[in-house]
Image (cartoon, rainbow, N blue to C red):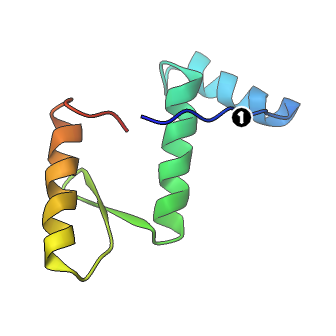
Amino acid sequence: MGQTLVRLEKAQETVIENLREKGYFRTKSEAIRAGIMELGRHYNIVAVHDGMVVKQVTDQRELKVLHKISEEIRQGKKKV
């Protein structure tokens, strides 16, 4: 898993903190990761199928690998 340092403006920090305090997310990092995935869905970079995250691809070999990765994430073997 990679690491990225993010500096937030006051309004962004307030949103993240409110989401955490209201129990939508356990941590700020979890909320930020969810927001990134939502951006990916919005811009058609990723898609969700049966609760699993899969990239939109046409190559069946690549799709098979992505399904395997999504299954590992679902089983808790990998983190998003």
Disc 1: CA contacts within 10 A as few (<14), some (14-19) or many (>=20):
few
- Looking at the image, the residue that sits furthest to the right is 10
SS of the residue under disc 1: loop
- Please name the residue that numbered disc 1 is placed on: 6
Q: Quadrant of the N terminus?
A: top left
Amino acid at dot 1: Val
Q: Quadrant of the C terminus?
A: top left
Q: Position of residue 34 (x, y in %)?
A: 49, 41
Quadrant in which residue 20 is drawn: top right
Q: Position of residue 74 (x, y in %)?
A: 20, 39
Residue at 49% across, 36% down: 2
- Looking at the image, the residue that sits furthest to the bottom is 58
Residue at 15% across, 46% down: 71
User: Image check: 11 left or right of 60?
Assistant: right
User: Image check: 15 left or right of 58?
Assistant: right
Residue at 53% across, 70% down: 43
Q: Position of residue 27 (x, y in %)?
A: 53, 20
